Amino acid sequence: MKDEIVIQLYETIDGKCPYLEWESKLTKLSRAKVSARLARIKLGNFGDCKSIQGVRGLYELRIHLGPGYRIYFGKTGKKVVLLLLGGDKTSQKKDIKKSCRFWEEYLSTP
Protein backbone atom coordinates (compact mmCIF):
# COMPACT_ATOMS: atom_id res chain seq x y z
CA MET A 1 0.00 0.00 0.00
CA LYS A 2 1.48 3.33 -0.93
CA ASP A 3 1.85 6.20 1.50
CA GLU A 4 -0.91 8.78 1.66
CA ILE A 5 -0.28 12.29 0.45
CA VAL A 6 -0.14 14.82 3.28
CA ILE A 7 -2.30 17.90 2.86
CA GLN A 8 -1.08 21.05 4.60
CA LEU A 9 -2.54 24.56 4.78
CA TYR A 10 -0.67 27.68 3.80
CA GLU A 11 -0.62 30.50 6.35
CA THR A 12 0.22 34.09 5.48
CA ILE A 13 2.89 36.01 7.35
CA ASP A 14 0.16 37.45 9.61
CA GLY A 15 -1.17 33.96 10.46
CA LYS A 16 -4.24 33.88 8.21
CA CYS A 17 -5.22 30.80 6.23
CA PRO A 18 -6.74 31.93 2.89
CA TYR A 19 -7.92 28.43 2.01
CA LEU A 20 -9.88 27.99 5.25
CA GLU A 21 -11.35 31.49 4.94
CA TRP A 22 -12.72 30.49 1.53
CA GLU A 23 -13.89 27.04 2.63
CA SER A 24 -15.78 28.45 5.63
CA LYS A 25 -18.03 30.43 3.25
CA LEU A 26 -19.15 27.37 1.28
CA THR A 27 -22.51 25.69 1.72
CA LYS A 28 -22.65 22.41 3.59
CA LEU A 29 -23.07 20.49 0.31
CA SER A 30 -20.13 22.27 -1.32
CA ARG A 31 -17.89 21.67 1.71
CA ALA A 32 -18.79 17.96 1.58
CA LYS A 33 -17.90 17.80 -2.12
CA VAL A 34 -14.58 19.60 -1.51
CA SER A 35 -13.80 17.32 1.45
CA ALA A 36 -14.47 14.22 -0.66
CA ARG A 37 -12.18 15.56 -3.37
CA LEU A 38 -9.38 16.21 -0.88
CA ALA A 39 -9.81 12.68 0.49
CA ARG A 40 -9.18 11.33 -3.03
CA ILE A 41 -6.08 13.52 -3.34
CA LYS A 42 -4.70 11.92 -0.17
CA LEU A 43 -4.87 8.62 -2.04
CA GLY A 44 -3.04 10.08 -5.05
CA ASN A 45 -6.10 10.65 -7.26
CA PHE A 46 -5.91 14.32 -8.26
CA GLY A 47 -8.62 14.09 -10.91
CA ASP A 48 -9.33 17.26 -12.89
CA CYS A 49 -6.38 19.52 -12.21
CA LYS A 50 -3.79 21.36 -14.24
CA SER A 51 -0.56 23.17 -13.65
CA ILE A 52 -0.53 26.95 -13.61
CA GLN A 53 1.42 28.00 -16.68
CA GLY A 54 4.73 29.65 -15.90
CA VAL A 55 4.80 28.75 -12.18
CA ARG A 56 6.61 25.57 -11.29
CA GLY A 57 4.87 23.42 -8.69
CA LEU A 58 1.57 25.40 -8.62
CA TYR A 59 -1.71 23.75 -9.65
CA GLU A 60 -5.41 24.44 -10.05
CA LEU A 61 -7.87 21.74 -8.97
CA ARG A 62 -11.25 22.06 -10.67
CA ILE A 63 -14.48 20.96 -9.01
CA HIS A 64 -17.54 20.92 -11.23
CA LEU A 65 -20.16 22.13 -8.77
CA GLY A 66 -21.96 25.44 -8.37
CA PRO A 67 -19.97 28.29 -9.93
CA GLY A 68 -17.05 26.02 -10.84
CA TYR A 69 -14.95 25.82 -7.70
CA ARG A 70 -11.18 25.99 -7.88
CA ILE A 71 -8.57 25.04 -5.30
CA TYR A 72 -5.03 26.30 -5.80
CA PHE A 73 -2.21 24.24 -4.35
CA GLY A 74 1.51 23.70 -4.50
CA LYS A 75 3.38 20.44 -4.42
CA THR A 76 6.23 20.64 -1.97
CA GLY A 77 7.40 17.11 -2.61
CA LYS A 78 6.09 13.84 -3.97
CA LYS A 79 3.87 13.30 -0.94
CA VAL A 80 2.99 16.81 0.30
CA VAL A 81 0.32 19.18 -1.04
CA LEU A 82 0.00 22.73 0.27
CA LEU A 83 -3.50 24.24 -0.07
CA LEU A 84 -3.11 27.94 -0.84
CA LEU A 85 -6.50 29.34 -1.80
CA GLY A 86 -9.97 28.47 -3.01
CA GLY A 87 -12.23 30.31 -5.38
CA ASP A 88 -14.48 29.83 -8.37
CA LYS A 89 -14.53 30.50 -12.09
CA THR A 90 -15.70 34.12 -11.60
CA SER A 91 -12.61 35.08 -9.58
CA GLN A 92 -10.14 32.78 -11.35
CA LYS A 93 -7.72 35.39 -12.73
CA LYS A 94 -7.49 37.22 -9.41
CA ASP A 95 -7.18 33.94 -7.49
CA ILE A 96 -4.35 32.71 -9.71
CA LYS A 97 -2.42 35.94 -9.08
CA LYS A 98 -2.95 35.61 -5.31
CA SER A 99 -1.96 31.95 -5.38
CA CYS A 100 1.22 32.77 -7.26
CA ARG A 101 2.08 35.38 -4.64
CA PHE A 102 1.34 32.96 -1.77
CA TRP A 103 3.39 30.23 -3.44
CA GLU A 104 6.34 32.55 -3.99
CA GLU A 105 6.13 33.71 -0.34
CA TYR A 106 6.07 30.10 0.81
CA LEU A 107 9.07 29.11 -1.31
CA SER A 108 11.09 32.11 -0.15
CA THR A 109 10.48 31.43 3.55
CA PRO A 110 13.47 29.70 5.15
Image (spheres, grey):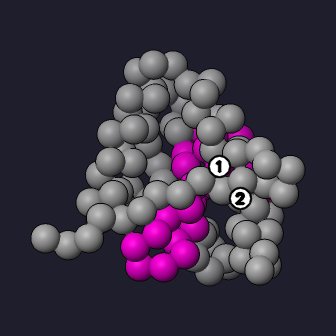
Image point (78%, 75%), residue name: 109
Q: Which residue is mark 1?
A: 85
The span picked out in magenta is 70-98
In the picture, measured across the screen, residue 65 lies left or right of residue 44, that is: right
* Amino acid type at image mark 2: Ser
Given the current orientation, which residue lies at the most extreme left position? 1
* Residue 87 is at least partly visible in this image: yes
Image point (70%, 45%), residue name: 17
Q: Secondary structure at mark 2?
A: helix
x, y (%) of residue 98? 78, 55
Mark 1 and mark 2 residues within 8 Å of each other at the beta carbon: yes
Q: Quadrant of the C terminus?
A: bottom right
Image point (57%, 67%), residue name: 74
x, y (%) of residue 61? 48, 54
Position of residue 4 relative to residue 57, above or below, is above
Q: Which residue is mark 2?
A: 99
Q: Secondary structure at mark 1?
A: strand
* Amino acid type at image mark 1: Leu
